[in-house]
Image (cartoon, rainbow, N blue to C red):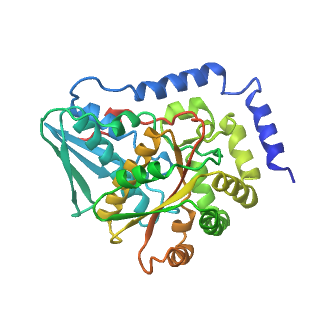
Amino acid sequence: MQTRREFLALSTAAAAMPLSACSEHDMDDYTEAAARLRVNLTHIPDMKALVRFATLAANGHNTQPWRFTIRKNAISILPDLSRRTPVVDPDDHHLYVSLGCAAENALIAGKTHGLPGAARFDSTKEGRIDIDLTPAPAQPDALYEAIPKRQSTRSEYSGRSVATDDLKRLEAAAKIKGVSIILITDEAGREAVLDYVIAGNSFQMDDPQFVQELRDWIRFNPSEALRTRDGLFTACSGNPTMPAWIGKPMFNLFFSKDAENEKYTKQLKSSAGVAVFIGEREDKHHWVQVGRSFQRFALQATALGMRHSHINQPIEVPSVRSQFSNELGLGKARPDLVVRFGYAPPLPMSMRRSVDDVIFS
């Protein structure tokens, strides 16, 4: 059986084949398109401009499970249930967290450009977030400047610790009504989290439906990522690019439990800490609030020169989640997100669908 190192070497060689869809030109086109999405606004925006910034938010598997409606000085965000991930997220928990992340981006961008607002969650039917904006003097916000720079950086980090004052800034930024946060920075605490990451990941890797759902959202080359403008582009995780006809069979052959557990072990051990987000209640409204809290945390981390990525395996498997909750002393409360943070160079940025594709009348 081939080792992970041999797999990466083979992947890199495959990506350089004459039939490859992964030329430098393709990657240049991808990088340019990703950069255009993140150009800062320099004037009071229209509602489409705020939607663009909302879509730069974190979201599970980069499925972008949202729909927007716009009116004068108002935006509504609704779930796009056609973009659910029912295996990893059967109760749509991550989906509503993603909507909260998008709402927070819109609120921060609006305030910065003279349209501050407030978000209301409408729990009727499928659930909707309404954001009403009122013209007012612009309020510059460092979190706004971080929106185009934020990314989920799925790589090993430097191992450098975070200063106490910066940890306090992260906690302060994440303060949202109905959400609490636990920061774990000591080695013993991070090792305990790792045990649950491995337990959850092992369970998921033994589930063929989980593996299939994940593979369906992987984009193996820049052309594919540009065509779909969604999903998990391999280059954004620091992995080789290759034609899909090579990537999919290789994924099936070499995406293994042992390799993934080894990867997560190295990633977590190299991180400065772990943040766990907990909503007061287990419902869609509080999941949205968790998303808002996390997005603010992620933007503050970005503003401080830090990276972050999700390690949600401990909360995605119910049997592991209950044990993890007990480990944290939460009793019956549900931990909603688990995120590692630390210092690392950036990776390529992910794509987003166009604004016109996510706005509905």
Determine whether, in the image, residue 228 is placed left or right of residue 118: right
**Which residue occupies 60% across, 40% down?**
344
In the image, residue 348 lies at what x, y percent? 56, 33
Note whether residue 134 is visible.
yes
User: Which is nearer the eye, 162 or 11?
Assistant: 162
Quadrant containing the N terminus in the rendered view: bottom right
Name above or below for residue 90 compared with residue 19. below
Residue at the farthest right position: 1
Q: Where is residue 356 in the image (x, y as percent from the top left)?
A: 32, 33
Q: Residue at x 51, y 73 (%)?
A: 328
Quadrant of the image occupied by residue 277: bottom left
Q: Is residue 199 left or right of residue 162?
A: right
Q: Report the front residue among 221 and 268.
A: 268
Quadrant housing residue 28: top right
Residue located 23% across and 63% down the image: 123
- Is residue 58 something one can see in this rendering? no
Q: x and y percent of residue 298 in the render?
A: 44, 47
Q: In this image, 358 relative to 331: left or right?
A: left
Image quarter hosting the C terminus:
top left
Question: Looking at the image, which residue sits at the far top?
Answer: 25
Q: Nearer the viewer, residue 191 or 83?
A: 191
- The percent coordinates of residue 3 (x first, y second) are 84, 50
Q: How many marks?
A: 0
